[in-house]
Amino acid sequence: MMDNPSGSIGTKAVLRISDLSKFYIMGEVRVDALKHISLDFYSGELAVLLGASGSGKSTLINIIGGLDIPSSGSLFFQEREITAATEAELTAYRRRSIGFVFQFYNLISSLSALENVQLVTEIAQNPMPAEEALKLVGLGHRLNHFPAQLSGGEQQRVAIARAVAKRPELLLCDEPTGALDFQTGKLVLDVIEKVNRELGTTTLIITHNASIAGMADRVIRLRSGEVSEDRRNMARLSPAELVW
Amino acid sequence: MKPLQRKLLRELLRLKGQMLAVAAVVACGISVFISMSSVRYSLESSRARYYSKYRFADVFMQVKRAPVFYLETVSRIPGVAAVNSRIVADVTLDVPGLDEPATGRLVSIPEYRTPVLNDLFIKSGRYIDPGKTDEVVASKPFLEANKLVPGDRISAVINGRKRDLLIVGMGLSPEYIYEVQPGAFFPDKRRFGVFWMSRRALESAFNMSGAFNDLSLTLAHGVSEKDVIMQLDNLFSRYGSLGAYGRSEQLSDRFISDEIKQVGIQITFLPVVFLAVAVFLLNIVLRRLVATQRDQIAVLKAIGYSNEDVGLHYLGFAMIPTAFGAIVGTLLGAWLGRGLMNIYADFYNFAELVYTFRAENIALSVLLSFAAALIGALGAVRKAVLLPPAEAMRPDSPVVYRPGFFDRESLRKKLPVSFRIIVRNLERRPWKAALSVLMISLSVAILIAGRYTYDSVDRMVQVEFTDKHREDVTLIFNDPKPPSVAYNLASLDGVLEHEYYREEPVRMSFGHRFRRQSIKGMQSAEGLQRLVDKNGVQFSLPPDGIVLTSALASILGVKPGDRLQVDFLQGRQLHREVIVSATIDEILGLSAYMNLPQLSRLAGDGGVVNAAYLRIDQSKAGALYKTFKKMPGVSGIMMLKALKESFEELIAKSMTTSTVILTAFACVLAFAVVYNGARISLSERARELSSLRVLGMSRGEVSFILLGEQALLTILAIPLGFMIGIALSALLAHALSSELYRLPLVFSAFNFLFAFMVIVIVSVVSGFVIRRRLVGLDLVEVLKTRE
């Protein structure tokens, strides 16, 4: 158990989502992925978004990350309305404020670990050195390895280094352990938790794995595009204590 | 280097096979463009320099004999800048080391060297010495072909008397850049040469003192050539003028102009084909690349790269191989261009043929290749740019298959599964399949068109040297002679057959169109010379009326049945009206044929002849040649066999070069298309094929599915390629046709067989390369990767 980790959580909402909906038209069928979602996230918060496959959690994280646009509703990031942003503004938003970690790591296979991180430090405004980001995730010794030479867990840690190197305000992790075994998964969660704790980055982890919820300050459950549960953990577990 | 640039370079290296194929195709196209455009520019600029430096005339005229004081009158014609009169005569030569007689053209030059029109460039040796009437400067090709040098002697029969001539110099003139004997179309360097000798010597030899028989003049800028020609014709018609003409009818200039025009056609046609294929290849390669990198595009966008960054990154995949191809193509083009210029130097005798590049052409080729890269990359780059980042995170939706033609109940039972997979794949994306077929067929077509000229020239040789002409020797008389000379010729030992003909210079007109032309009066069209069209079909000579070659008929705008106005330029200079009885589509030149008695009747004289065809007994050729060498009254001798040999030798070199280049380029094209097609198929279907392997199919069966698809496309492409090749050849034949010659449209079976074999070999080789990759697929790895 950690000592009241929520003490570092700010009182001001970094991210304000109100009445957000998203539907897709697939052929002749309308799919409502998100229905009137309203959520606020606070700075330094580590939130876990739970939901089964198809519950709309990926859609939500894509919209938050500026990868997708909602059908209706609004999204404010630090008082800026992201839903009204132009394509160029969205690019700048992703470039400055968002760090992404994907289920399948999505490293560029033709670039080494260091170069994959440099991909970000190259274009970010005030990045940490790429080597430092890799050291942070415990890969200081594998800088020049290519993705094919790294294990799944290592690849995901490179992806985390890539995401945090720009010092993002928001770290979005989409099923970060989805492709990993139990032990490796816990190692990766450990890194995410460390980034949240040491850098104070607001972190959102989406997963279908309910056991991960234990490490969060806050747990939100999505079901069929609607928020079915939004609760705060009294205390955060360390990833090492998680069991699934 | 930035990480994205590093990604670009590493992935280009990974795709090196496909990228090299693109670069090779671009290089082929650019090298043709660069070589042809530099050759054209070099020919044009060398000609322009040569003409101006050595004062090539604008208007030319041959007369029988005109008094020199008329020059004063000519120079007063408004617009005439400079005038030069000469004495020009053709004589028989006895060349050391040559059994057969040769023909020399003697051209007068001033005794003291002064600048004249059509001036002489002395390559080696010296100008003639004043007062030395036996000194000559001889033309370079003749001297080189006969291995003669200044200081050697040669004998000529000048006006019936044998004279020894001392060669003092080797020269060239802008008038004879293309040096052919009058009446011939192709150079025979050993048996025809131009000799420049003192005017005084020629005046006394041909009784021409105070007279001239050749006039050339230059015009002031902006003067109408037509007006001057009209005045000259009026002035000199009573002196036996054959009609004045401009540069466009000057044989040598005509040949070079046609050559430059033909080079121009090749500049446009081939590079367009190659760049079109490059566009196609880039399109399929990049589309596939973007499809396999959907997730990477998503990541780049997710971490903050803009659409422009991503678009430029993928554009790089088109630009780098294209730039590489353009650089190689430019270097290759410069090298090829230089080589081609050396071949041109064999045909055309320039004082200096300088190979020069034009910076604009390089700039244009760079522009062209980048335009091709841009067009080729457009679709894929657009897709990468437009791909919404969230969309890109999801795998591509599975492709839709529908039952096709081959899925009908009746067929389905008969076809094996693997075959059905192949066909369904092609049916699923018919446009892509059709484009692949088209691209392969283009390489077949280039092979066909490349070898077409071979067949065409073969036919030309067959028609001109075998079907049409059966004589061995043609004797051209210096003056019209009574037909009785033929009996003298026939009585020579060894003459098996003889036939004589008359060439009568006339001015033909129909409506407002007219043409200087000579009419050939023939004894018959069934004897030594025949009327044969470009397809080898024999024509008969009608008892009256005139037969025109189709090209001449179209210049005059006449058709059979029309009444043609004919003005005889010599003798009684009568005006006649003749009915066009037929047109014949001949290969070479422009001709008009008539029955000899009819021509004599129209000319209004008792009937004279200008030349004789002889068929001789080869065992007695040596003695006959000796007789011909001494024969007075003969201005020219042509040996059909020698003409044929020199033509074949000359043409063989240039044809072989261009065919080898075209064949190599077509192979590159075929390989690039087939290999890339198979590589992309492999990449698209590696998972599917591995699954089939896991399910128990053998390597052979899986290879059959992948390579079978390519084989099917190739099989479909071959007949289409034949058709496009024929169309392309017809287009080429049409574009390359001129007044000088028309290429007959003929194809040998070997041409098709050759193209077929080349494509099959190229396909098999690329099949092997792909199969090695297919066999090397790591089944487990492939199945693990997310497509």
Image (cartoon, coloured by chain):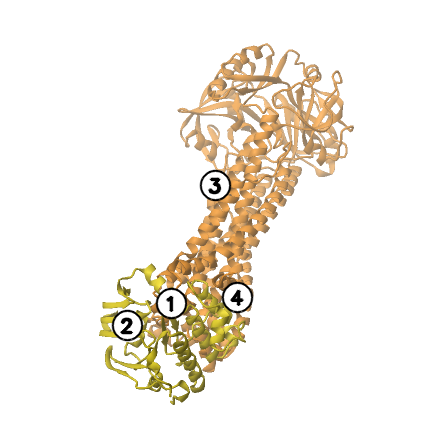
Q: Measure how far apart labels 3 and 1 are at the Cα level.
A: 56 Å
Chain coloured yellow? A
Q: CA distance from mark 1 to mark 4?
A: 25 Å
Whether label 3 touches label 1, CB < 8 Å: no
Identify the residue under disc 4: B14
Q: Amino acid at mark 3?
A: Ala
Q: Nearer the viewer, mark 2 or mark 3?
A: 2
Q: Nearer the viewer, residue B313 or B69?
A: B313
In the rendered view, would you say B642 is above or below A67? Answer: above
* Residue on which disc 1 sits: B302
Cα distance in 3D space between marks 1 and 2: 26 Å
* Chain letter for the orange part: B
In this view, the residue in front, B454 or B317, is: B317
Residue B113: percent from left, percent from top: 69, 19
Q: Chain of mark 4?
A: B
Indicate which label's residue lies in the foreground, 1 or 4: 1
Q: Amino acid at mark 4?
A: Arg
Q: Which residue is mark 2?
A: A12
SS label for mark 4: helix
Task: Give the label, 3 or 1, closer to the camera.
Answer: 1
Q: Which kind of residue does numbered mark 2 sit on? A: Lys
State the SS at label 1.
Answer: helix
Please determine whether, in this image, residue B777 is positioned above or below residue B668. Answer: below
Looking at the rendered structure, whether the residues under marks 3 and 4 are on a common chain is answered as yes
